[in-house]
Amino acid sequence: MKKLWNFVPSHILLWYALGVLFQFQWSIGVPLFHTLFLCFVLLIFFQYVWKSYLLIGFIAFLLGIQAICKQQSRFNVDSEHENLVVIIDRVLKSSMHSERYYAELRPKQANGISKRILFSVEKDSTRGRFEIGDVLLVRGSPKETEAAKNPYGFDYKAYLKTKRIETQLYIRKGGCLQVSAPVFSIMRMASRLRATLVEDLQNTIEDVEVWSVTVAILLGDRRFVSKDNMANFSNAGIIHLLAVSGLHVGIFNYLLFLIFKPLELFFRKKWVSLLFVLIGLWVFAFVAGLSASVVRAVTMFSFVSVGMFMKQLVPIGFSLVSSALLLLLFDPYLLFDLGFQMSYLAVISIVVLQPLIYGFWKPKYKVARYFWSLATVSLAAQMGVLPLSLYYFHQFPILFLVSNLLVIPCIGILLVTGVVVLVWSVLGGGDSPIVSIYEFVVRKLNQYVTWVGEKEIFVSKNIYFSEAMMVTSYFVLIAILMGVYTRRVKYIYLVLSTVLLFQLVCLYEKSKQMSTERLVIFHQYKESLVAQSTDGQTASWGVDSKKSNRNLNNYWVDTGLPVTQKYRNTRPFYQIKDQLLFVVDKAGVYEVQGLNGGFVMLKDTPRINFERLLHNLQPSAVIADASNYNYVKEKWRSTCAQQNIPFWDTSVLGAYVFGDN
C-alpha cells in the first residue's frame, strides 16, 4: 500500500479527479492560458522553494478543471427552426415510439460550435435505424433537457449531464435527411461488425432468450435481453454477467496467456506472448463494438498484463492507477460513469480485500480451496461496491454468493463455447452438436437465474442509503484496511472515529426523517396521486397502478419514508403544518367559504364555475394535476392570471411539494 501511495501517477489521478469533480459541481471559468500560466508559476515556485508531491497535485488539479472547461462550451441556436447537421455518435435502446441516439450537433455555419445532444426520431417502419457516423440534415431547435416531473427517483437530466448532454432534439417521422457520406471512424466499423455478428448469431441460435443472453455475454449488447430476464439477473446478484465487464475480459486475458505462452519458447522472447495477448484483447474489444464498458475493461487488463510482464512488486495496483488515469485523461466524464466506478472499485477490492478474507481459512483439499477462493473473490468485490450499489439501486441480493459460486465456474466454459458458436455462425451456421450443447447450457443458466431471481424474499429492496452514508461507509472501510495493513495501534482510533462518524450520520438521517412533514401532489398521466409523510411514515391516496407503485417506491428510497398506508380515494382536506389543501374532484363540491390563504387542488376535471370557486375560496394558489384535461387547464390558467392567483400545472411544472423539501 505504501509503495502504491508513493507511485507518482496515484497522486496525479487523485488530484486530477478532484479537479474534475470541482469543475463539474461549480463550473468556474478558467481559460486555458490562465491555467498554463499558473502551472508555470507553480513549477518555478516549487522548483526553487519547496519540492514535494504537492506541486504535482496542484498541476493535476488545474488540469482536471481545464479538462471539464473544455467540454462545457455552449451551443447557441435561435428559438426559430433552423437547418442543423447531426452526426450519430451512439445508438441507444429504442423507446416505445422513437429511436434514440447520442449525437453530435453542428450548426450549418462553418464557425459554429459542436455540442453533444440526445437525438430522438419518431419510429418509421419504412426506414431502418441510423448507424454511428451517419450524417443527417434536420430542421428543428434543440431544447434543454427536462428535469423529472416527480422530484424523487432517477434524475435523467443529471444523468445526461454526466454524458456531456444538456440539450435534446426530437424529430418527427420524415423530418431528417441523410446527406453526404458517413463519417469514417473505427467506432462505426466496430459497430457494423457487431451488428453483423448479432445477425449471424440470430440465424444460428433459434431460442430468443438464449440468443439475447449470448449477445450480451459475448458482445456486450443488452438491448435484446427482456426486462424480466434483466430483473432476474439483477435479483440474483449476477447482472454483471450480461455485459462484457472485467470478469469476462479477465477470463479471456487468462485464456490468451495460456494460448500464446508457447510462443515464448519458439521466439525465445517473453515479450512476444505479451504482444499477442494485447493484440487479442483489442481485437476482442473491436468485435464487441468498442463500447465504453469493453474499452474500459480491456484498457485495465492491458495495463495489468504489462505490469505482470514487468514483474513489479505491486503490478495490479500500479496497473489499475495507470489505466484509470489514462481513461480519465481521454474522457474526464468517465469519472461520473457508474460502470467505471463499480469496475474499478470491484477490482481494487479484490486486490486489497481478497487476500485478507482468504487468510481466515485455509482448506486442506483442492476442491474446497477452489470454491473458497471463488467465495472470497465474490465477497471482496461485493464489499467494495456495496455502498455504491445501495446508494444507486437501493437493493441487496442476499443470494449473490450462492449465484456467483454456481455461475462463475460456468462463465469460462460459456465464453469458450460461445466464441466457437460465434465463429460457426460467421462461417454459415446450421445444426451442430456444439450449438446444441451451448443452447442447453445457456437455457439451464436462464432457468437457474429465473428460479433464484423469483425468490424476492431474498432480495432486500427499498433500502434508504444517502450520499453521506455512502461516503462515510467508505471512510470506515478505508480506515479498517489501513489498520489491518499497518498493524499500528493508532489506527484503532481512526477506525473507531470513522465508525462513530457513520453512526452519527445514520442518527442524523433518522432524526431528519422523523421530523419531516411533507405532502406531495405527484404528476401522473391521467391519474391522481397524493402522499403525506409524518412521523417517519407515509400514507398515499390514489389509484393502485404500476405508475403509482413506481412513484411511491421512488419516493420511499429517496427520502427513507416508507409507504405504510395506501388509500384509493383522496380526502377532501389535507393539512401540513399551517398549510391547508382543499381538494375539488369531478363532483365539483366545495361547500366552504374562504380558505384563509389555503390551496386548492383540482382533479378529474370538475365541472365547476371556476371564477365562482376562486371568489368563494380565495385560495393562495391553484394546483391542477395530470388527471385534468389539458384544454380545461389552459382556461383555468388564463383565469388565474387575470386574478393574479398562482396556477401550478403538474404536467408543465412537475409535482407540487408542501413542507420540507
Image (cartoon, helix red, strand yellow):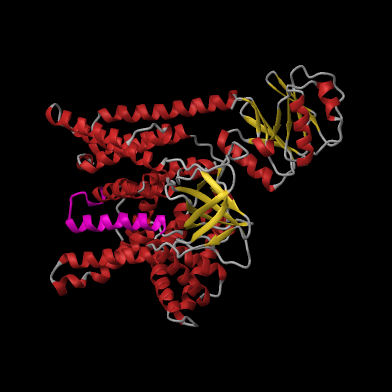
Residue 86 place in picture, x, y as percent = 50, 55
Q: Position of residue 476 (x, y in %)?
A: 37, 34
Magenta residue check for 195: no
Q: What residue occupies the far top of the structure in this picture? A: 596
Residue occupying image coordinates x 59% and y 44%: 80
Q: Can residue 240 be seen here?
A: yes
Q: Position of residue 465 (x, y in %)?
A: 50, 36
Choose between 647 and 286: the one closer to the eye: 647
Q: Is residue 576 left or right of residue 136?
A: right
Q: Is residue 62 left or right of residue 562?
A: left
Is 308 within the magenta?
yes
Q: Quadrant of the C terminus?
A: top right
Frontmost residue, 234 versus 635: 635
- Relative height, residue 452 to residue 267 (above, below): above
Decide if residue 483 is in sight here.
no
In the rendered structure, the answer to whether residue 355 lies left or right of residue 390 reads: left
Please identify the quarter of the rendering in which residue 14 is found: top left
Q: Which quadrant would the N terminus be assigned to in this image?
A: top left
Where residue 520 sits in the image (x, y, percent)? 67, 32
From this view, report whether residue 280 is shown above or below residue 532.
below
**Number of numbered discs overlaid on the protein picture:** 0
Indicate the quadrant where residue 302 lies.
bottom left
Does 332 sit above or below residue 607? Answer: below
Q: Residue, x 47% and y 56% (percent of image)?
A: 87
- Secondary structure mostly seen in magenta is helix
Q: Is residue 549 left or right of residue 246?
A: right
User: Which residue range is magenta in the image?
Assistant: 291-317
